Image (tube, rainbow, N blue to C red):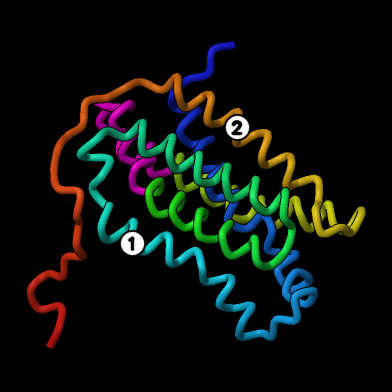
Amino acid sequence: MKIKSTQTIPFALFLITLAVNLSMPLFRPYAALAGFNNGQTSLVLATYVLGMIPCYIFLGGISDKIGRKPVLIFSLFCAFISDLIISIYPNVYALIFARFFQGIALGLSMGTGTAYLAEILSPNPDAPTRAANATSMSTALGFSGGVFITTVALLIHFTHSPITYFFAVSITLIGIILAFYLPNLPPIGGSVLRLPYFPKGSFP
C-alpha cells in the first residue's frame, strides 16, 4: 500500500513529539537513583530548551533556505538519537543528552512540518487550514501518547527500561525511511536567521 505524503508528514511530527514525553514517567525514578534533588531534576527536564530555543531563533528559516525535506529528516534523526540514547542508557545523565536532541528535533520540525504539508496540499485554497489541523492533531497525539504508553507499560511491569523505548526506536526508524520518499519541493528562499518580530506599539 502506497503511503501518501500527507500521511507521512503528520506521522513524522507524531514521532518527534512522541520522543519528548516518552520517558517522563521515569524522570523521578532516574533522578532518585542518581541522588538528584527537585531543582536538579527540573534542570534536566529543561535541557531540551537548550536545543529548541537556538533552533527557533537562529535557524527559524532554514527550511525556507535549504528545503523542507532535509530539515524534517534531520529532525526525525535527532528524535531517533534521543530515543536510542535513553534506551541504551536509562539513567538521568543520558536523559540530559536525550532531552537536548529532543529540543533540536522539536525546534526544527514544528514550523517546517506545517509549511511542508501546506505546500504539498496547495493549490487547494484551504491548504494552510488543513495542514495546521493535521499537524496539530499529530503533535497533540505525540505529546500525550508518549507519556501515556510508557505509563501503561510501567503499570504492567515496572522497569527503568520499558518496552516503549524500543518501540519508539523502531517506529522512528520506519519514519525516517518513509521521509526519504517525500517529494523534494524547491526552497522558497529567505534568511536562515529569523528573529522575533514585535509590531509597533507592542511595548510602552
Q: Quadrant of residue 90?
A: bottom right
Element type at mark 2: helix
Instruction: Between residue 188 and residue 202, name the one nearer to us.
Output: 188
* Figure check: 27 above or below 148: below
| Furthest residue in direction left, as rendered | 200
Please rate how many residues cluster around mark 1, counting C-alpha atoms within 10 Å: few if below 14, some from 14 to 19, many from 20: some
Determine which of the numbered discs, if any, sits on residue 199 in the image.
none
* Figure check: 167 above or below 201: above
Q: Quadrant of residue 104?
A: bottom left
| Furthest residue in direction top, as rendered | 1
Left or right of 197 in this view: 134: right
Q: Which residue is mark 2?
A: 173
Q: Position of residue 186 (x, y in %)?
A: 21, 26
Left or right of 199 in this view: 36: right
Question: At x 54% / y 46%, what residue is drawn?
Answer: 79
The verdict on residue 115 being magenta is yes
* Figure check: 191 above or below 185: below
| 1 or 2: tag closer to the N-terminus | 1
Q: Position of residue 175 (x, y in %)?
A: 56, 31
Q: Which residue is mark 1?
A: 54
Q: Which residues are magenta?
A: 111-133
The verdict on residue 142 being magenta is no
Question: At x 75% / y 75%, what residue is drawn?
Answer: 34
Element type at mark 1: helix
| Mark 1 → mark 2, Cα distance in angstroms | 26 Å
Amino acid type, callout 2: Leu
Left or right of 142 in this view: 119: left
Amino acid type, callout 1: Pro
Q: Position of residue 4 (x, y in %)?
A: 47, 20
Please rate how many residues cluster around mark 2, counting C-alpha atoms within 10 Å: few if below 14, some from 14 to 19, many from 20: some
